[in-house]
Image (cartoon, grey):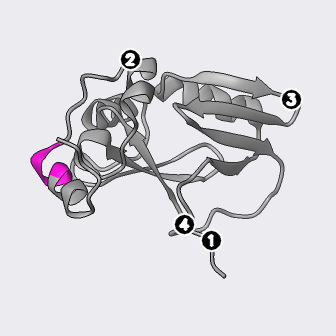
Amino acid sequence: MTVRAVGVNHIAFEVRDLDEALEWYERYFELTLRGRHAKMAWIDLGDQFLALSEGGSEAPDRDRHVGLVVEDKEALRSALIAGGEAVAPGGHLRVRDPSGNQLEIVDYREVQFSKTPAVLRAMGLDGLEKTPAAREELRAKGIDDG
């Protein structure tokens, strides 16, 4: 018997210094801290969350990454560049946090990833509209209702 995976509840990153990591994430993202202990913190991402755990000393993997969805990829790119982060001036947007965790930043409007209307309202994002290409991708999967 197999069980269907239905989504991602959270992403867990190991960080070298929890305070440094939280300061970095707060510099570039509006965030709500779900909770914090001495060596762990949880950042809400709507109905999901990012778990940060202090410890470990492994070097970052060159290709492993997490795709993080934002309301405006280009606004974040501008903030990252202004903050001195090493990111490309256009196209794909990838950045590493201070511990080397790689984030691939994608714009909510351009991908099939969707939040329910209730979650979007609660996040203050109910005005975000998908691009025609993203809506078609959703329709092809029988997901889009409009």
Disc 4 residue type? Answer: Arg
User: How would you rate the neighbour count of disc 4 (Cα within 10 Å): few for under 14, some for 14-19, many for 20 or more?
Assistant: few
Disc 1 residue type? Answer: Val
Please report the bounds of the magenta region as a residue range. 131-135
Of tags 2 and 4, which is closer to the observer?
2
Residue 87 locus on image (x, y percent): 36, 47
**Mark 2 lies on residue:** 124
Disc 3 residue type? Answer: His
**Mark 4 lies on residue:** 64
Nearer to the camera, 80 or 84: 80
59 falls in the magenta region: no
**Mark 3 lies on residue:** 37
Disc 2 residue type? Answer: Gly
* Tags 2 and 1 touching, CB below 8 Å: no
Q: Looking at the image, which residue is at 18% across and 49% down?
A: 135
Of tags 3 and 2, which is closer to the observer?
2
Residue 57 locus on image (x, y percent): 80, 58
Q: Looking at the image, which residue is at 63% across and 41% down?
A: 50
Earlier residue among tags 3 and 2: 3
Residue 117 locus on image (x, y percent): 36, 29
